[in-house]
Amino acid sequence: MIELKTVETRHVPVRYFEGGSGPALVFLHGAGGLTAEDPFLAELAKTHHVYAPLVPGYGDSEECPEIRDMLDFTLHTWDVVEALGLKDPILVGHSMGGMIAAEMAAIAPNDVSRLALIAPAGLWDDDHPIPDLFATLPFEMPALLFHDAVAGAAMLTAGRDVEDPGFLQAYLVTNARQLGMAGRILFPIPERGLQQRLYRIKAKTVLIWGDSDKLIPPAYAHAFKKGIAGSQLVSIPEAGHMVILEKTAQVAEAVGSLG
């Protein structure tokens, strides 16, 4: 069972999901946020004791004006790990969360021994520009995020009518709040110098990518692999950027290879 809890850090109380048993694992979510019903959390919790902190401003968590840039995000998340009393947990991040996890492993290389980056943001290649999430309309999201856009749309809306004004209003308000926070490291482009720091990562690293990722194309997988010594790449067919929803068990299996 996944429970929503609160832990105090220096700047802000942080909401986090916790569940499962086994080796400690910290999961950092992407720009779309996270809920207790997330199937990937449930899958991870079958084999690990999972802690999944919400970025301030996501869900019902408080916003935190003190978190302004990439270094702030990185140190804040280390503060959360410390507040949870964890030592060298398996660190897993998806998309924006992968960018934060990679920065954490680069800034404190001796404190992270196992790292899983699932289609992480953080690099930039002019030949493969990453689409602007902040200019993407709701109805455009499924084709951008999923291999199967129709199935993806059903997952994103949970069967709700996307044309219902009430749904759209709630979606836009929530999205504005969350992306306002995410924009501090993702806007105008999701690049804050990580490329120059990847060499510092010492962790055993597995990179997990959907072959059909249209948001952060697989070309970035090879850039990360080149930058992180000894890293392993797991490519998953028939999966897009939301590979954690489209191929949940396969991603969890790849994460499980870390222990």
Image (cartoon, rainbow, N blue to C red):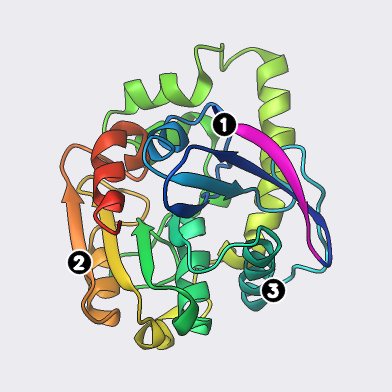
Q: Position of residue 189 (x, y in %)?
A: 52, 67
- 156 vs 234: above or below: above
Q: Secondary structure at mark 1?
A: loop
What secondary structure characterizes most of the magenta part? strand
Instruction: Say which residue label 2 marks.
Output: 232
Q: Nearer the viewer, mark 3 or mark 1?
A: 1
The residue that appears at 52% across and 82% down in the rendered structure is 108
> Does the segment drawn in magenta span residue 81?
no
Q: CA distance from mark 2 to mark 1?
A: 30 Å
From the viewer's side, name the closer residue of 241 and 202: 202
The N terminus - image quarter: top right
Question: What is the secondary structure assignment of the residue under circle 3?
Answer: helix
Circle 2: element type: strand
- Give the residue type at disc 3: Asp
Boundaries of the magenta span = 2-9
x and y, in percent, of residue 161 in the image: 56, 11
Mark 2 or 1 closer to N-term? 1
Decide which of tag 2 and tag 3 comes sooner along the chain.
Answer: 3
Residue at the spot 30% in from the left edge and 68% down from the top edge:
205
Pointer 1: what residue? 2
